[in-house]
Image (cartoon, rainbow, N blue to C red):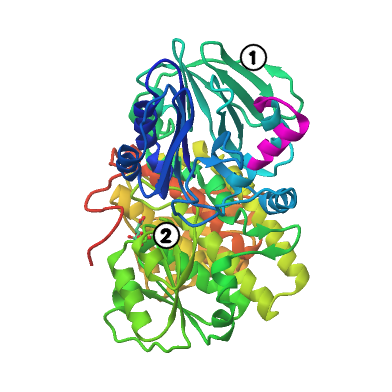
Amino acid sequence: MCGIVGYIGEREAYPVILEGLKRLEYRGYDSAGIALYDGQDIKLSKTKGKVADLEKRVSSEIDASGTVGIGHTRWATHGVPNDVNSHPHYSNSGNLVIIHNGIIENYESLKQELIKRGYTFTSDTDTEVLINLIEDVKKNENVKLGKAVQIALNQVVGAYAIAVFDKNKPNEIVVAKLGSPLAIGIGDDEFFIASDATPFLEYTKKAIYLEDEEMAIVRRKKGVKIRKIKNDSLVAPYVQELQMNLEQIVKGGYEHFMLKEIHEQPNAIKDTYRGRLRAKEGIIKMSGIDDNIEKFLNTNRIIVIACGTSWHAGLVAEYIFEDLARIPVEVEYASEFRYRNPIITENDVVIAISQSGETADTLAAIKLAKSKGAFVFGVCNVVGSSIARETHAGAYTHAGPEIGVASTKAFTTQITVLTLIALKLAKEKGSISNSNFHLHLQELELIPGKVEQALKSDAHIKQVAETYKDAKNCLYLGRGFNFPVALEGALKLKEISYIHAEGYPAAEMKHGPIALIDEQMPVFVIATKKGHYEKVVSNIQEIKSRKGKIIGIVTEGDVDVKNLADHTIEVPETLEVLTPLLTTIPLQLLSYHIAVLLNKNVDQPRNLAKSVTVE
Ligand code: F6R
């Protein structure tokens, strides 16, 4: 996630770009930078930190005049967040400058080729490789910038939204898109470029949204020419009239951040495994694990510490690690762990999971574990957060900023990271066969598409929500890998609809909770084909015979549960270890729709905060 902004027209570019970057800061805030052209030269200023830090730096570093420029706010992927890795990036000649949102997956091989041809690199980024590739093409093929960008992009594998500027062609900006968003605002003799329309809403309501594999040359006064990157064919621009206000656009057209974030999960999961999972080659690459592999392989146990939804992800990890990597796992509430004099040794590996990276209890538990000599590994979403800094090593989830207080995409991306780690350790330990390892990698790669499929049940789920919205209590049941999903389903309902809900392992019902069952009690049962299916069907029968209402989360094509349940919601089939990534989706949507139907404040539920920095 990064934000890109560009301007070419009659006004001073700097204030337009700066304000635009502030609005796009939700997309990443590891570093920010700007390049302006004042009629003679490019002036570039960039810094680690937020747009506010950039503003300070610009005022002391450059004369911010000029009517053309590009700016960037970064969510670090390749290369740590620092000044050098910040965008914009120059080409070796200093003539070209680029901003980029996305990942160039084959950057390493391209870089090696360019190094052989004499190019040098100052940053660790894939973006610096791309701008030099463009320069190389431009020089060798003796073509204009637009053509060079097109030829270079045809050699690139990955995702991008880019804006490129050539100081020798100062009346144009070349942009292109694949997989990352890019909008062009059309003003009177002026043009705006941005990751979304918020940076130019006050200047124009006319916008072109580039499609994947399209590029455009945006020329001062002359307009926008769009072409297909692959076959060079011209595309007639489709200019849209923007209907939205600022707030809506930040929510991407969704009514609530929570709904937007639920729908972002296919991409969030993909972004999380991108660059790490190479299914075809049978490789999982995670530097935080690679660099500390002996610690993981020599430990007698892993202790997971977390709170709330992150704790539920930890519970899923317990099942996954023990099943695949055969390493014993204990999952602890950070708030309990820190105060109960736990037995921790230098041989222990502790995994701390936190979306915000700021949760006070988790932070304190990490410090305690470190003080006893344990190796602590972080799984965080917010780059550079306190927990990310406090842990010895870690792996980020690349879910992008999660604004809705109820955690959704953080949960599924945490499970994605933890699954990658478990698979990697299983491979290293030899606790998984080669063929099974490959099968898991291939299936994990299919999960974003399957989540997309699960999201298609939204309208049906809304109807189910309508039926149960007035319930006073609800039960959530699951077994094995899906027991933690039942807990998470119950938490989602509680926190945004204020309906009392409890999650249980399905077989525990007969040890007490079954006494609660009557015709008023909706019971949400995760009953996918893989994973104790027959036993869960028996549990459903026990509830049914006591007149409970059954809502089954089932595998596509299910028959048995459908015959018993009052409602069923289907999810696609996958390997048992990966089912939590799919069964979670309908439970998130159910909670969301019930809360909306009850008129609750979905994104900011009462008494809660996004980042719990008090104990
Ligand atoms: C529930 C939720 C909370 C958080 C918990 C931990 O939807 O968001 O339960 O999961 O406060 O927060 P992080 O993951 O930021 O440490």
In the image, taking residue 125 as reference, residue 515 lies left or right, namely left
Q: Quadrant of residue 344?
A: bottom left
Looking at marks 1 and 2 on the same chain, the residue that comes earlier in the sequence is marked by: 1
Tell me: residue 354, above or below residue 38: below
Q: Nearer the viewer, residue 458 or 472?
A: 458
Q: Nearer the viewer, residue 469 or 491?
A: 491
> Which residue was labeled with disc 1?
236
Circle number at residue 406: none
Q: CA distance from mark 1 to mark 2?
A: 47 Å
Disc 1 Cβ-to-ligand 1 distance below 8 Å: no
- Confirm whether the magenta stretch covers residue 142: yes
- Residue at 50% in and 43% down: 264
Magenta stretch?
Answer: 132-146
Question: Majority secondary structure of the magenta segment?
Answer: helix
Q: Quadrant of ligand 1?
A: bottom left
Q: Residue 457, percent across and down? A: 55, 41
The local secondary structure at tag 1 comes to loop
Please name whichever residue, 57 or 522, is drawn nearer the observer in this view of the structure. Answer: 57
Residue 46 placed where, x, y %?
Answer: 42, 43
Find residue 524 and report its horizontal and vertical position in percent: 46, 56
* Point 58% across, 25% down: residue: 168
Residue under label 2: 488
- Residues packed near mark 1 inside 10 Å, few (<14), some (14 to 19) or many (20 plus): few
Residue 60: image x %, image y %? 31, 41
